[in-house]
Image (spheres, rainbow, N blue to C red):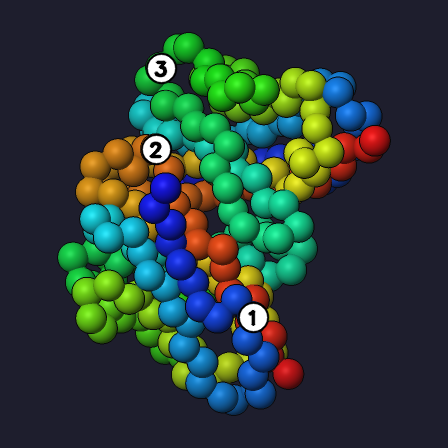
Amino acid sequence: EPEVTQTPSHQVTQMGQEVILRCVPISNHLYFYWYRQILGQKVEFLVSFYNNEISEKSEIFDDQFSVERPDGSNFTLKIRSTKLEDSAMYFCASGPPAGLGYGYTFGSGTRLTVV
Amino acid sequence: AQTVTQSQPEMSVQEAETVTLSCTYDTSESNYYLFWYKQPPSRQMILVIRQEAYKQQNATENRFSVNFQKAAKSFSLKISDSQLGDTAMYFCAFMKDFMDSNYQLIWGAGTKLIIKP
């Protein structure tokens, strides 16, 4: 069964450093998402990406965050200057062009720890 | 704005018992999708079951079934013959059914389910 692949599985970074979280969505999918989950809290929407541009972003997704699809297969989330409160599990998800009501496919997540 | 509420922070049952997790939601939309996701200790997010709001029939996937009450805006998950591997966080999620929504998932706070041997 096709998978969404996220790397790294765990990243530890110093506060103020830039991090790039990587995702390889399922190849024929057109909708891409980043969600995050702070430990013990709700899953929160960060951003959706469709047709090579951001289609919606939450208030969490401020100027410190950016996404891109650099080569048509990878989908990256960059945090420019990490803060302690960015420590969370970050999930990438992708959905097919039709049938999003079937639910997306999530990656296994990247655990980001900012120290 | 849509909201999803899971009123049970934690539940535990004995192996082989049946357990029901509750979820209510608030929306003015007539068509939408509802999902239950499972998050085991590995923290992977796994789709358990889905329901389309315009379908009257409750969805079933093996030991997992839902009780969808559209008028009451309720979407509970029943796990029959529970197994140790069912131990996980369970999240209820809502998705509006149109393009302008960007198909964003709105999540409940989750219910931690513990299956005891």
Q: Chain of mark 1?
A: A
Q: Distance of mark 2 from mark 3, alpha carbons?
A: 14 Å
Which residue in the protein does label 1 denote? A10
Q: Amino acid at mark 1?
A: His
Q: Secondary structure at mark 3?
A: loop
Q: Amino acid at mark 3?
A: Lys
Quadrant assignment for the N terminus of chain A = top left
Q: Distance of mark 2 from mark 1, alpha carbons?
A: 29 Å
- Residue B80 image point, x, y percent: 65, 18
In this view, the residue farthest toward the top is B57
Q: Secondary structure at mark 1?
A: strand
Relative side of A50 to B10, left or right: left
Mark in front: 2 vs 3: 2
- Residue A83 image point, x, y percent: 55, 80
Which residue in the protein does label 2 denote? A102
Q: Residues within 10 Å of mark 2 (few under 14, many from 20)?
A: some
Residue located 21% across and 55% down the image: A50
In this view, the residue farthest toward the front is A1
Which residue in the protein does label 3 denote? B55
Residue located 24% across and 68% down the image: A69
Q: Residues within 10 Å of mark 3 (few under 14, many from 20)?
A: few
- Please, is residue A31 above or below residue A78 in the view? above
- Residue A34 image point, x, y percent: 40, 59
Relative side of B117 to B19, left or right: right
Dots 2 and 1 on the same chain: yes
Q: Distance of mark 3 from mark 1, alpha carbons?
A: 40 Å
Q: Amino acid at mark 2?
A: Tyr
Q: Residues within 10 Å of mark 1 (few under 14, many from 20)?
A: some
